[in-house]
Image (cartoon, rainbow, N blue to C red):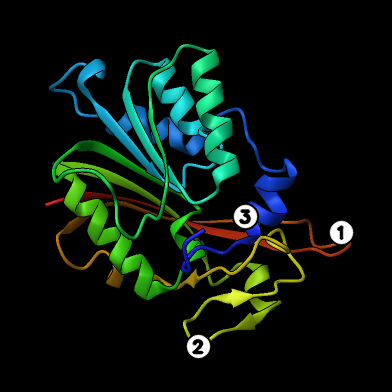
């Protein structure tokens, strides 16, 4: 694992067989089909995911005929994804590595996916990763950024480090998943201030019923941006 990547994902989560998801997340499916380029066939449309985990989102895209690539810091998750692709005779460029320095050439992809991965590093590091994503996306390419909001209950139950990440989270839906950055609206605007056009910006909050025990909010950003 690289220094920026929290080892909890390899040591305590993927390494122990947890979060090895098999099916894609609905927001990712909707994003790909709503925002894929219409001027080229699916077979020529390239999708990249940062923090691709067990490869469940890319598995869906590959089955649908897209060209796919992903980068993930957990060796266990990458092995799992590669084996699944091999068993199902799917093609994918699945790499172990750090999304702060992407291993692909400029202008390689049409679509990029971040589902709760960039939020695992500091805002400063996220800016680096987003710059890298802009580099590998073609002009007019789109990115789905899915990060956590400062309105999330878990943002209140941990220790805030000097880099802005909250660590040792003890409550809410994100307890035990390592350090996370919880973004404000201003943070989102700054992340995409240069070289991007915000196409869609959603702040999603799921609230437990008020009379339930340990009621909490799950709050996240769903942002779609286009490379200028």
Residue linked to disc 1 = 212
What is the number of the mark on residue 162?
2
Q: CA gap, disc 1 to disc 2?
A: 34 Å
Q: Nearer the viewer, residue 107 or 147?
A: 107
Q: Nearer the viewer, residue 202 or 53?
A: 53
Say whether disc 1 or disc 2 marks the residue closer to the N-terminus.
Answer: 2
Dividing the picture into quadrants, the one containing residue 196 is bottom left
In the image, is residue 127 above or below residue 199? Answer: below
Q: CA gap, disc 1 to disc 3?
A: 30 Å
Residue at (50, 53) in percent of width and height: 116
Say whether disc 1 or disc 3 marks the residue closer to the N-terminus.
Answer: 3
Residue linked to disc 3 = 9
Residue 99 appears left or right of 203 = left
Local secondary structure at mark 1: loop
* Closer to the eye: label 1 or 2: 2
Q: Residues within 10 Å of mark 1 (few under 14, many from 20)?
A: few
In the image, is residue 88 above or below residue 196? Answer: above
Local secondary structure at mark 2: loop
Please say whether residue 187 is visible from this viewpoint: no
Residue 70 appears left or right of 12 = left
Instruction: Where is residue 161? Give x, y as percent.
Output: 55, 84
Instruction: Where is residue 214? Give x, y as percent.
Output: 84, 65
């Amino acid at each position: 694992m690289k220094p920026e990547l929290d080892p909890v994902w390899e040591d305590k989560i993927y390494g122990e067989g947890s979060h090895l998801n098999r099916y894609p997340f609905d927001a990712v499916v909707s994003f790909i089909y709503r925002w894929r380029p219409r001027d080229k066939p699916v077979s020529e449309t390239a999708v990249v995911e940062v923090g691709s985990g067990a490869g469940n989102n890319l598995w869906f895209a590959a089955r649908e005929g897209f060209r796919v690539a992903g980068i993930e810091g957990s060796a266990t998750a990458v092995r799992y994804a590669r084996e699944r692709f091999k068993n199902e005779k799917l093609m994918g460029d699945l790499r172990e590595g750090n999304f702060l320095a992407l291993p692909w050439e400029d202008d390689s992809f049409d679509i990029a996916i971040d589902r709760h991965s960039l939020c695992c590093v500091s805002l400063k590091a996220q800016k680096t990763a987003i710059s890298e994503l802009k580099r590998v996306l073609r002009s007019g390419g789109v990115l789905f950024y899915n990060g956590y909001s400062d309105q999330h209950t878990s943002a209140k139950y941990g220790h805030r480090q000097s880099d802005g990440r909250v660590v040792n989270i003890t409550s809410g839906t994100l307890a035990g998943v390592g350090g996370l950055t919880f973004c404000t609206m201003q943070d989102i605007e700054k992340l995409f201030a240069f070289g991007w056009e915000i196409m869609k910006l959603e702040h999603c909050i799921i609230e437990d019923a008020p009379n339930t025990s340990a009621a909490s909010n799950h709050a996240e950003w769903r942002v779609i941006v286009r490379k200028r």
